[in-house]
Amino acid sequence: MPSTITRAAVPLTKSYLLLNHGPVTLVSSAAGGRRNVMAASWAMPLDFDPPKVAVVIDKATLTRELVEASGEFVLNIPARAIADKVLAAGSASGREGDKFARCGIATGAAEQVAAPLIAGCVGWLECRVIPEAHNQQAYDLFLAEVVAAWADPAVFTDGHWHFPDDARRTIHYRAGGNFFATGEDFSV
Amino acid sequence: MPSTITRAAVPLTKSYLLLNHGPVTLVSSAAGGRRNVMAASWAMPLDFDPPKVAVVIDKATLTRELVEASGEFVLNIPARAIADKVLAAGSASGREGDKFARCGIATGAAEQVAAPLIAGCVGWLECRVIPEAHNQQAYDLFLAEVVAAWADPAVFTDGHWHFPDDARRTIHYRAGGNFFATGEDFSV
């Protein structure tokens, strides 16, 4: 399902701000004509400049196979409007058939990597794996450099989130199909 | 400032739920008669059982020195009511004098580690570092096993967050003194 994704470039040094508040992510991947998407709460920034991220990708997943084959993935930051698809992508296995079709997830092309950008997301971090075999084997932990970053300009501009409505808020995963929306912003 | 902290044990296999939604944390540490506290947004669960976490601790910090000396720290999960102290702890350096006194941060004793529990928090993960010198040197990345976990029973019981009021919600850090409160919970 190709889709038109409205996105504006986020300067690489500001890209950690897409992930800093701890939203749930969708990890998309592609290799050898196959592609997949999985949900991941265990993702965080690792460095500012060059920007890096850390994400846990279980050995049992098709995503793991595709990320190891390609050395690439996209961390997509979904909006509340597609929370049902995040749950579906987190519950199904890509080994049982194309998850994009089954979960009704549309995609667009990334710029630097083969993995697709997921429609209905509000931020995207294109990532290239930093090979660290011990972390990958012992902890399922992948470190990666962010090589391109995008955001929906209706939701994130100039390094700031400004959610125009509840449907476009980012979300945080609890467990068992339960989420929190990103809530009130405040300063101290 | 010693304090009475109301806390109930969280089973270790449920402890990841304290961190799963991506709240900001306070990292407390102690070694050789010194102690410190710093704010960290870059923390995430790494495994379920035994539970592990990953957290980024910059080389320049006193926390780094104390964590490397002791092999221990506590990930404290602050409530909105102490957001001003989180910001203060994230802005000051422990090398300039006791941050607990300067930031008005009260503490209680942990059970398994020397690092203190921070009052005004709603969850606590006592952690023992898994020595991984390359990650620590190359990425400022610390992996640790959770050896005890606690939560304020008014806020988290049976593996579920149930914030009784806005002051006791967990919080997520943006940048520049700006936070998000953990927002509405919903299921799909």
Image (cartoon, coloured by chain):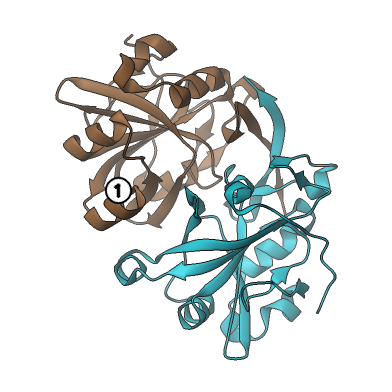
Chain colours: A brown, B cyan
Q: Residue at x 33, y 65 (%)?
A: B135
Front residue of B85 and B74: B74
Residue A165 visible in the shown view: no
In the image, residue B179 above or below residue B72: above
- Residue B160, position as x, y percentages in the image: 71, 40
Name the element at disc 1: strand
Q: Dot 1, how many residues are within 10 Å of its Cα: few (below 14), some (14-19), or many (20+)?
A: many
Which residue lies at the image location 65% right of the left edge and 86% below the top edge? B97
Q: Hey, what amino acid is under mark 1?
A: Ala
Q: Residue B70, position in %: x, y?
A: 51, 81
To which residue does mark 1 refer?
A: A144
Horizontal relation, residue B142 to residue A173: left or right: left
Mark 1 belongs to chain: A
Q: Residue A37 versus residue A78: which sits nearer the camera?
A: A37
Residue B118 at least partly seen? yes
| Extreme-bottom residue of the structure | B33
